[in-house]
Image (cartoon, rainbow, N blue to C red):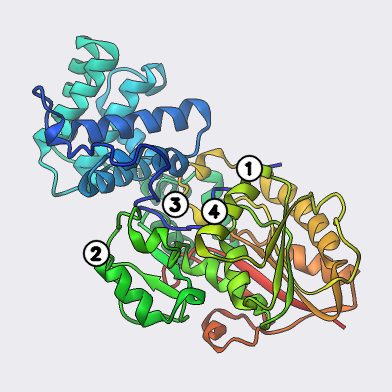
């Protein structure tokens, strides 16, 4: 099974919640690491280390960032995150340019040297506020630390050439797919799929959006107080909220904050993308409802459902991933939701409870994550063309199992953070063809209207309003 991308936040270049442990640890500002280190070198060193682990060990960048950012001051946390996710997103285009300047094939270089080159070139092309000498000198130092003076000299020569101007892109007229793949840094096969699914104009806009930073969004815990009260307490902690939101519990932040603050620890909010919040609103459980969340880890939607069902309701959170369930339990404890029962079970094998036992069921199924390429840019390089159909088979089986839990007149919402039609509408069509007692219906939430398609399902995509890509369908059992 494809690993589900780390979820819950859905935020791209944001500061992750501080890792547990080491309270009061010293924070580096880059310049204060001392002993002659150039300003910002420590931040770039951490970014390079994360890039190497993502490249060579299959790690996920956002998980590593969550573990490494806590000892840095806010400015360096932002720089580390921007460098790491930016290099991963733009890797294909960066490598295309580097091959024009480097006398050695990139794949022959030590991973640390390749990472230094990519970091340096990314800064030259995308971070206009960083002086050229700072981008080059820090990259040279990183390469020299990892592989000696010769590697430092190679990086210096390559980046000095690159600093003179960008390399010419391929001829679009001669090979349009190749041009788009390099220009927007997406695998060629994925570019072809996007064009087949959405047409050329939208595909190009989508790839451009995939390389941008997602908004820093949080879900306010309205079980702890009114929106204005929570926003005021967050402001005391230096967390500024942008005006105007679709949902009362949604807040977009003015900047990436340090979540190691009293309002976060008090459970007043939880980092979660706006698109993810809209999925729980598709189910719209009534206060006092019994809700089953069939793939609950890591818990963002679970806690949202617990809030919507309020203290009179109950949420049963199922997941095969025991560690993910523990993370979901920790979130629930911090937010103060005591109406959630956590059950370690595999909905794809057999539901652990009797049939027709709930009126509201959510299946946020594991997927390829193509709707979240902004915060998980490494996924674009790991996906394979066959993954969409393979995941659709698993998702269809999970949906059939989950649907047995829905009582007559009850509702199930099927959702994926993917924009691939095979994983969204394709799975739902197959399900409805086999289960005639279920019908699609529009969600009873006016705020969702801009995202609802003619058949009542919801489709979100980054190039349309900046939301993460989600598909969700609400179906009622007759």
Of badges 4 and 3, nearer the viewer stands 4
Can you identify the residue that label 4 sits on? 7
First in residue order: circle 1 vs circle 4: 4
* Of pointers 1 and 3, the one earlier in the residue sequence: 1
Q: CA distance from mark 1 to mark 3?
A: 21 Å
Name which quarter of the figure residue 225 lies in. bottom left
How many angstroms separate mark 4 from mark 2 (CA)?
Answer: 25 Å
* Sequence order check, earlier mark of 2 and 1: 2
Nearer to us of marks 3 and 2 is 2
Query: Disc 4 to disc 3, how far (Cα)?
Result: 10 Å
Disc number at residue 211? Answer: none
Q: Secondary structure at mark 1?
A: helix
Between marks 3 and 2, how big is the CA–CA gap?
A: 24 Å
Front disc: 1 or 3: 1
Q: Alpha carbon of mark 1 to alpha carbon of mark 4: how far?
A: 14 Å
Which residue is nearer to you in this view: 425 or 347?
A: 347
Q: Which residue is mark 3?
A: 375
* Pick the front one: 450 or 463: 450
Q: Counting residues from the N terminus, which is met first, the one under dot 3 or under dot 2?
A: 2
Residue 323 badge: 1
Residue 129 in the figure: left or right of residue 53: left
């Amino acid at each position: 099974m494809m690993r589900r991308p780390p979820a819950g936040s859905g935020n791209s270049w944001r500061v992750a919640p501080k890792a547990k442990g080491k309270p009061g640890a010293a924070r580096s500002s880059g310049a204060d690491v001392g002993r002659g280190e150039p300003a910002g070198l420590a931040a770039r060193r951490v970014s390079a280390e994360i890039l190497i682990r993502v490249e060579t060990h299959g790690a996920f960048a956002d998980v590593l960032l969550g573990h490494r950012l806590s000892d840095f001051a806010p400015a360096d946390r932002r720089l580390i995150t921007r460098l790491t996710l930016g290099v991963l997103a733009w890797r294909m285009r960066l490598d295309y340019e580097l091959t024009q300047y480097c006398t050695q094939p990139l794949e022959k270089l030590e991973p640390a040297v390749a990472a230094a080159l990519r970091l340096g070139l990314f800064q030259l092309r995308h971070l206009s506020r960083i002086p050229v000498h700072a981008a080059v000198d820090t990259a040279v130092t990183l390469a020299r630390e990892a592989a000696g003076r010769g590697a430092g000299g190679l990086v210096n020569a390559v980046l000095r050439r690159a600093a003179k101007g960008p390399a010419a892109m391929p001829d679009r007229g001669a090979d349009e797919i190749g041009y788009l793949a390099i220009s927007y840094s997406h695998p060629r096969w994925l570019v072809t799929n996007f064009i087949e699914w959405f047409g050329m104009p939208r595909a190009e806009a989508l790839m451009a959006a995939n390389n941008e930073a997602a908004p820093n969004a949080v879900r306010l815990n309205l079980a702890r107080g009114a929106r204005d009260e929570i926003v005021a307490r967050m402001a005391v902690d230096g967390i500024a909220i942008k005006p105007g939101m679709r949902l009362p519990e949604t807040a977009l932040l003015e900047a990436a904050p340090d979540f190691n603050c009293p309002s976060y620890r008090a459970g007043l909010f939880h980092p979660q993308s706006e698109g993810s919040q809209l999925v729980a609103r598709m189910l719209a459980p009534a206060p006092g409802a019994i809700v089953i969340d069939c793939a609950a880890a890591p818990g963002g939607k679970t806690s949202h459902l617990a809030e919507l069902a309020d203290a009179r309701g109950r949420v049963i959170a199922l997941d095969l991933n025991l560690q993910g369930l523990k993370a979901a339990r920790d979130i629930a404890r911090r937010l103060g939701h005591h109406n959630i029962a956590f059950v370690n079970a595999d909905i794809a094998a057999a539901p652990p409870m009797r049939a027709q036992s709930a009126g509201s069921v959510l299946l946020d199924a594991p997927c390829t994550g193509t709707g979240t390429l902004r915060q998980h840019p490494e996924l674009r390089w790991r996906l394979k063309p066959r993954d969409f159909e393979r995941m659709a088979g698993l998702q269809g089986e999970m949906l059939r199992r989950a649907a047995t839990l829905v009582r007559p007149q009850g509702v199930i919402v099927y959702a994926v953070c993917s924009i691939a039609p095979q994983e969204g509408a394709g799975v739902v069509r197959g399900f409805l063809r086999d289960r005639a007692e279920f019908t699609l219906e529009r969600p009873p939430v006016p705020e969702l209207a801009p995202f609802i398609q003619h058949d009542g399902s919801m489709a979100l995509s980054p190039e349309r309003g900046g939301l993460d890509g989600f598909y969700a369908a609400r179906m009622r059992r007759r």
